[in-house]
Amino acid sequence: MKRLGVLLSGRGSNFQAIARNVAQGRIEAEIGVVISNRPEAPGLALARELGLTAVAIPSRGLDRESYDRLLLEELAKHNVDLICLAGYMRLLSATFVRAYPLRILNIHPSLLPAFPGLDAQHQAVSHGVKFSGCTVHFVDEQLDAGPIILQAVVPVLDADTPDTLSARILAEEHRIYSEAVSIVLAGKFRLDGRRIVTS
Ligand code: GRF
């Protein structure tokens, strides 16, 4: 059985959606460990409630390389095959990314490469785009930039605020993140340049 490692910093609703799909057998894997850089993250409490191994590794005072070394040690301890970033609000070092080639996924609440970085839904509303959505992609050494696995599109309505748009996008995030995890775990893709071709 393949093992997932989840990294999160906050609410954890994407983690929750993945955990539900694992529990219901729609994702053929087990969750080996859930790690947060924020001990008070609601997502970490949720992991504990679900009876999963939940570990807080506070990042305060540590430089990126030292912190990521701790993360790598913890993930190795739990024999993690695939890492899912689920609202993990820290950049990963090159050392970390290179340790798990094509084995780290992230979800971002925009149609990348539009609106990378923080507050993507706010960026979309203020830019005035008519459609936005979410992207599941492999993590490389740049922010929100790795090969795209799946995207989903939602309309941006005239009355939208960043909050209403976020809610519409989030429903799609919960759907496509699990789908992408299944594709990757099953090895049903190949990399062609920077295109992910699913099979
Ligand atoms: C989501 O919008 C995700 O796309 C972004 O951070 C948010 C995390 O939400 N990377 P949650 O913690 O999964 O509820």
Image: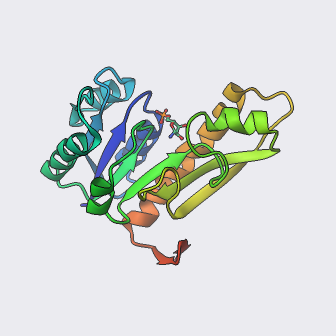
Q: How many marks?
A: 0
The location of residue 53, given as percent across then percent down, is 21, 37
Judge left or right: residue 60 versus residue 22: left
Residue at x 76% of width, y 34% of height: 125
Question: In the figure, is residue 69 to the left or right of 4?
Answer: left
Instruction: Residue at 80% x, 44% y: name it.
Output: 129
Q: Classify 37 as above or below 177.
A: above
Is 92 above or below relative to 187? above
Q: Position of residue 107 (x, y in %)?
A: 51, 47
Location of residue 152 with respect to 164 vertically, above or below? below
Image quarter in which the N terminus is found: bottom left
Q: Residue furthest right?
A: 158
Taking the spot 15% from the left edge, 48% from the top edge, the residue there is: 73
How are the residues colored? rainbow
Horizontal side of residue 130 vs 179, given as left or right:
right
Instruction: Give the vertical position of 195 relative to 35 (above or below).
Output: below
- Extreme residue in the top direction: 40
In the figure, residue 29 lies in which quadrant? bottom left
Q: Is residue 108 left or right of residue 167?
A: left
Q: Nearer the viewer, residue 158 or 184?
A: 158
Q: Nearer the viewer, residue 19 or 109?
A: 109
Could you tell me residue 11's position as x and y percent? 44, 27
**Is residue 138 in view?**
yes
| Residue 168: image location, x then y, percent | 68, 36
Does residue 26 appear in this view?
no
Q: Residue furthest left?
A: 77
